[in-house]
Image: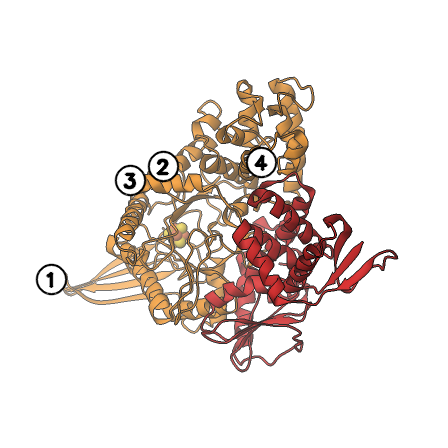
Chain colours: A red, B orange
Amino acid sequence: MRIYLCEDSFEGILTAVYDAWAGRLGHDNVRLELQGEYNLELFADYVVVLPDDEKAEKVVRTLRQKLSEEVFEYVYKAAMSQERRKADLIYRFIVLAIQRGARIVSEFGNPVVMDIFELVRNVSNESHLLLGFIRFQELENGVLFAKITPKNYVLTLIAPHFEDRLSGENWVIYDAVHEMAAVHARNTSWVLSREAKMPEKLPESGQEEEYEELWKIFFHTIGIEARKNPKCQRNMLPLWYRKNMLEFENNENC
Amino acid sequence: MAEKSWLFVIGKIRIYVRKTLAIRYIICYNKKNENIYSVIEMQIEQKMTIQEKLQILTDAAKYDAACTSSGVDRKGKAGSMGNAAACGICHTFASDGRCVSLLKILFTNECVFDCKYCINRASNDVKRAAFTPDEVCTLTMEFYRRNYIEGLFLSSGILKNPNYTMDLLYQTLYKLRTEYHFMGYIHVKAIPGADEELIRRTGFLADRMSVNLELPTGDGLRRLAPHKTRKTILKPMKQIQKGIVNSKNEMTVYQEAPRFVPAGQSTQMIIGATPESDYQIMSVAEALYKNYDLKRVFYSAYVSVNTDAMLPALPDGPPLLREHRLYQADWLLRYYGFEASELLSPDRPNFNVLLDPKCEWAVRHLEYFPVEINRADYQTLLRVPGIGVKSAQRIVRARRSAKLDFEDLKRLGVVLKRAVYFITCMGRMQYRIRLEENSITHNLIHDDRKKLYEMQENESFTQMSLFDDFHLTVPPSVEDGRAAVSGQL
Ligand code: SF4
């Protein structure tokens, strides 16, 4: 058994897919794992894969041109998952996809496909929810700053939405869990900054407090008392997401 | 209306004084009947802070059920702020579990009308406030930049008269779009009785417009909303419908033509304030979808805010379960190809409290069942309890590559617990079940009751309507079908 240890990034995983494929050991004799947490196995030989943009690019081209945009999207989103087994799942999925073609995405019976679906669903859900739940604060220098603490690597999935929406603003979305940030300067394209570390509290602009208060007033007024339904509220908006939402500060839940 | 009007005559001059709790008019005419002096004084405290205004005007707006931001996709543009996402985005969830997507406010809660069910009616002694257009614009922009909202939902009480009010709404939207360069979502109310021209101009600035039907029948309106009539409500609705069709036609000729109400129009009915049956309500909804191309009809369980001899007391709170059944049935009309007359009739005018409308229909029509999963067409699959739009689509897709069995159905998202009574896979039913109305009903009710129980225990009320507007890929066929029809008109 040969185990390819790859970096936890899109390029890292696809490079390992490329290497594992090119190694020609037979799909049953290889496995992909993320660097970091793994149990050393006695009879395996370990290969550390360094991310290689060129190799990754080749895999991407195969997916997009020989298969479909949809297959590519599935692979990309699965690679953004928090799931530790994702590298190997992606490898199995790509192997299958190449055998069976683009219709792989409607093979609901296949366990590998179902596993990938599950990852994709999870990542898509979280990024969709965050499009609404992200809160920007205006800093002293006019920059809009948002801190998020997502489970998956959603930054690259949500940044394009805000680039389109807030094109005239300088903004930063900081993923405090994975320590990365999406940075956008007015009227330019956003860039991803890895290994970003930001302070918890940044100096706010003079009017920030007023608008935060106004928002809380609105939020606390808009619910209808006679229809109060905390359980439903919790289903729709799990406590997990409330950490970074000002209207729920101090554990306020209504 | 609790109003007093006096007429004084001093020499040649006539003076009218009209007083409600909210408004005082003093209007003076000379002998040629020319208006020589008028003061309209409102109990709006001018010195009110923006915080107070926001509080009052949010509180007054919250009973409107429609707060969705869906239906239009618009890319952002350099030099402006905002875009719109067709799928709709929830920004938070209020204490009642409802999605908050738009800054839902009234321009003013001042109102010269006196609708019995409404907290803002002229005869109520409540604190009155009014925004200025700039205040609404600034709030919208600053909330939007911080990603609190998808856009604005602007409604209003009737200040002075319908035209005056509609003009204020128009001025506000005009400012927001042209001076503040806001490109996010706007839902605005068309005020019944306002000039066509004002409504037309406003429609070119908004994404969605709505005129509330308020009560399902003209009779209900006469009793509870003496200043509104079916006619003044339906007229702007027709106008908006025609405007949308024209605008779509123009778009096909000239891509850059300004778009009129691109996200379509919606309306709201209040449920349980008047004695109409579910059958009447669903028939009205169906007619609205068919004859007015409405995107959505919202049902709003009446919340008792006023005590009035004309209104029910509702000691058990708003009729939420009934509202829920109506939403379920509405869903069946729009996406499942049902007609109101299939679900209810003058002899069975109300939905079963214990069973959802689709199950109820199925057990009364066992002659259609069981259906074979591997052969039945899409429309037939849709009618099976436990099979939704998504799972029906998946079945059609998946059975191309393999014969499906019960295990597969589970994976495709079919709720087998309900579906088993109505389907076969490769000619076989999962269990030996007697196809008999009473026993199936009994089993389904047992299942539904658990769900109901959960619901009353504050489970997932809004889930349905949410599913509708948010992250749902609706089958293009139905909406497109309607779009195609309206295009032909
Ligand atoms: S017109 Fe009727 S429903 Fe509207 S604010 Fe005035 S009283 Fe309320």
Q: Which residue is mark 3?
A: B488
| First in sequence: mark 3 vs mark 4 | 4
Q: Which residue is mark 1?
A: B32
Report x, y in % for residue B46: 40, 72
Q: Please say if the residues under marks 1 and 2 sit with CB atoms less than 8 Å apart.
A: no
| First in sequence: mark 4 vs mark 1 | 1
Q: Amino acid at mark 4?
A: Ala
Q: Are marks 1 and 2 on the same chain?
A: yes
Position of B437 relative to B80 (above/below): above
Say which of B363 and B458 sits in front.
B363
Q: Amino acid at mark 3?
A: Gln
| First in sequence: mark 1 vs mark 2 | 1
* Chain where mark 3 sits: B
Local packing at callout 3 (Cα closer than 10 Å; few below 14, some 14-19, many 20+) is: few
Which quadrant would residue B172 be assigned to in this image? bottom left
Local packing at callout 4 (Cα closer than 10 Å; few below 14, some 14-19, many 20+) is: many
Q: Amino acid at mark 2?
A: Lys
Please identify, in this view, whether the residue under mark 3 or under mark 2 is nearer the observer.
3
| First in sequence: mark 3 vs mark 1 | 1
Q: Which residue is mark 4?
A: B398
* Chain where mark 1 sits: B
Quarter the C terminus of chain B occupies: top left
Please identify, in this view, whether the residue under mark 1 or under mark 2 is nearer the observer.
2
Q: Are marks 4 and 1 on the same chain?
A: yes
Q: Which residue is mark 2?
A: B290
